[in-house]
Image (spheres, rainbow, N blue to C red):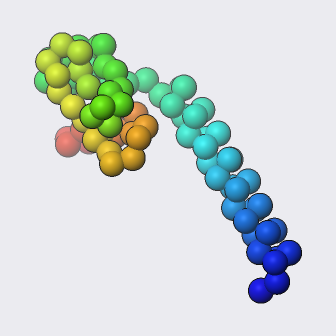
Amino acid sequence: MDENYQNKIKQKLTNIQKMLDEIQTEYEKTTELKLCPFCGETDIFYSEKSCAYMCSKCGARGGVSIFAGSDKSDWNERAEE
């Protein structure tokens, strides 16, 4: 492969990643977190230290991820659904 072709591919992949990041950001802005399934608390926050969403009342964690910025769907997922 010539260098020009490789650069075009890299640029396209960069553009795709930017689009995916924008979609993820918009999803995060518009998606509400569910109540804590254990205590019903509404104050749920993202902990950078734990890489997870946590309940401020009982400390329940959900959506633990090895990647920073676990998304809200990880917290919102419930076993009965």
Q: Is residue 64 left or right of residue 11?
A: left
Question: Closest to the observer: 22 or 11?
Answer: 11
Residue at 32% over, 37% down: 51
Q: Is residue 27 left or right of residue 36?
A: right
Quadrant (top left/top right/bottom left/bottom right) for the N terminus = bottom right
Residue at 31% over, 19% down: 44
> Where does the image place residue 64, in percent across and percent down from the top left?
28, 41
Q: Is residue 77 visible?
A: no
Q: Is residue 26 visible?
A: yes
Placement of 56 over or under 11, stated as above or below:
above
> Where does the image place residue 18, in percent across and percent down from the top left?
68, 47
> Where does the image place residue 3, in percent across and percent down from the top left?
81, 78
Question: Closest to the observer: 11 or 41?
Answer: 11
Residue at 26% over, 25% down: 54
Residue at 18% over, 13% down: 57
Q: Is residue 32 left or right of residue 38?
A: right
